């Protein structure tokens, strides 16, 4: 029996015919039943408990709690993983974005093209560097920055492009880099959701002039606190970033730049070193779950399009539906953890009202559509087969309820 048929069978006994007061009781009953969490970090950490404790003990014995040997070791290991010469550990993904732009001497008077469908941190990094974000529309099928729209936005003040590898899928970097090279622009990958993602066989982090990563706990490679990283093969840029993150110091007591306190903790680096060894198998598990989810989804839900040259590592598993908000309510009533991401679109946030120079086009139709219709289903490596099946069945049931309500 298909997932859709399996959940439709119980409905035949009368759920669609119940009076409204009975439907409330049904929702309450389902909400109380065991569900599928949106994310479950405790499962990951339980499997690594001894190794994580060992890393903690190692840091405890060295007294290197900020920067130090563990950070240096992680920087070396993550740079090698991404296929670049340098990694600079910093305090967060947002700090990584801002510091990269500062090291590239992009700031006041400069414009940086960013997608309108992204987490607000992408644009905040630009603002923190003193530059102006210029919001660009995205592709309908992937939610990634649209190279054709990028071409239209390049102007005399444009200094950089920030393609975001959203949801764990690399942006169209061949086209982005061609535009950048034609106009002499800096390209900063926002790879906060793309640990291990690739484009045409090359890993995210090695595709532009530099890349910014987040190690927020729920990322594919997440710390047990906040953290971020800058990847590049430009040694001079990396050296400047190291100084900027550490109060402008090139060496102890020699402050050569007006810097910031954006250093990665030694403990987080040690924990990330443990997790890095598991990243490939976790990403493979995410891809398996995504494939099974795709096959079980009802036709009413539109999943993310995945292109052969950009295999997605599924930090999130987004789908779209025109009645998104009501569907979210129904799925949660079925016990399914659901997220809504990047709604409103980045350029619609009140924070940018105070920035009159911020370029916010009147119409960004694809970004607005994603903001209205996107919801994210549970996605993490430790999902069980039974949970994946339950998510698909709940999606079919919820879509059936929506259809019945409009019949």
Image: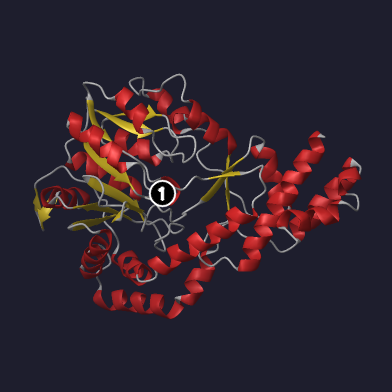
Counting from the top left corner in percent of width and height, residue 388 is at 62, 61
Counting from the top left corner in percent of width and height, residue 312 is at 43, 53
Counting from the top left corner in percent of width and height, residue 316 is at 50, 52
Quarter of the image for residue 153 reads: top left
Identify the residue at image location x=47%, y=21%: 363
Identify the residue at image location x=39%, y=36%: 145
Q: SS at mark 1?
A: loop
Q: Is residue 145 above or below residue 38?
A: above
Q: Nearer the viewer, residue 151 or 327?
A: 151
Image quadrant holding the C terminus, namely: top right
Quarter of the image for residue 358 reads: top left
Q: Nearer the viewer, residue 342 or 250?
A: 342
Is 20 on the left-hand or right-hand side of 102?
Answer: right
Q: Is residue 241 above or below residue 34?
A: above
Counting from the top left corner in percent of width and height, residue 264 is at 28, 58
Please tell me how many numbered marks the rendered image carries. Answer: 1
Q: Nearer the viewer, residue 405 or 231?
A: 405
Is 57 on the left-hand or right-hand side of 348?
Answer: left
Is 139 on the left-hand or right-hand side of 338?
Answer: left
Q: How is the image coloured?
A: secondary structure
Circle 1 packing at 10 Å, graded few (<14), some (14-19), many (20+), is many
Image quadrant holding the N terminus, namely: bottom right
Identify the residue at image location x=83%, y=47%: 24
Q: Is residue 64 above or below residue 197?
A: below
Query: Mark 1 — residue?
Result: 169
In this orientation, does residue 353 appear?
yes
């Amino acid at each position: 029996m298909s997932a859709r048929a399996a959940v439709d069978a119980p409905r035949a006994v009368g759920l669609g015919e119940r009076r409204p007061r009975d439907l409330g009781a049904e929702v309450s009953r389902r909400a109380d039943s065991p569900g599928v969490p949106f994310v479950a970090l405790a499962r990951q950490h339980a499997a690594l408990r001894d190794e994580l404790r060992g890393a903690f003990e190692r840091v405890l014995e060295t007294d290197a709690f900020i920067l130090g040997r563990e950070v240096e070791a992680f920087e070396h290991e993550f740079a090698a993983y991404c296929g670049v010469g340098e990694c600079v550990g910093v305090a967060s993904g947002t700090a990584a974005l801002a510091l990269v732009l500062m090291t590239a001497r992009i700031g006041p008077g400069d414009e940086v093209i960013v997608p309108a469908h992204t987490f607000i941190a992408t644009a905040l990094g630009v603002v923190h560097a003193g530059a102006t974000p210029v919001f660009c529309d995205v592709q309908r099928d992937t939610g990634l920055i649209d190279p054709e729209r990028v071409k239209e936005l390049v102007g005399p003040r444009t200094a950089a492009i920030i393609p975001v590898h959203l949801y764990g899928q690399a942006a169209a970097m061949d086209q982005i880099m061609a535009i950048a090279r034609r106009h002499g622009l800096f390209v900063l990958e926002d790879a906060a959701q793309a640990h291990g993602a690739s484009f045409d066989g090359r890993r995210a982090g090695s595709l532009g002039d530099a890349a910014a990563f987040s190690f927020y706990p729920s990322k594919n490679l997440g710390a047990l606190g906040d953290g971020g990283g800058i990847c590049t093969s430009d040694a001079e840029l990396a050296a400047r970033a190291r100084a900027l993150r550490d109060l402008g110091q090139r060496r102890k007591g020699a402050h050569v730049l007006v810097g910031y306190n954006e250093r990665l903790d030694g403990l987080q680096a040690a924990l990330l070193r443990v997790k890095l060894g598991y990243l490939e198998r976790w990403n493979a598990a995410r891809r398996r779950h995504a494939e099974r989810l795709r096959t079980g989804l009802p036709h009413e839900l539109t999943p993310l399009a995945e292109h052969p040259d950009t295999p997605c590592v599924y930090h999130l598993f987004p789908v779209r539906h025109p009645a998104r908000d009501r569907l979210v309510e129904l799925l949660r009533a079925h016990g399914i953890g659901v997220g809504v991401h990047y709604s409103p679109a980045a350029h619609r946030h009140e924070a940018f009202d105070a920035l009159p120079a911020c370029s916010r086009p009147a119409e960004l139709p694809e970004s607005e559509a994603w903001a209205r219709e996107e919801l994210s289903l549970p996605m993490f490596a430790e999902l069980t087969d039974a949970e994946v099946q339950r998510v698909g069945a709940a999606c079919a049931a919820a879509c059936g309820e929506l259809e019945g309500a409009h019949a």
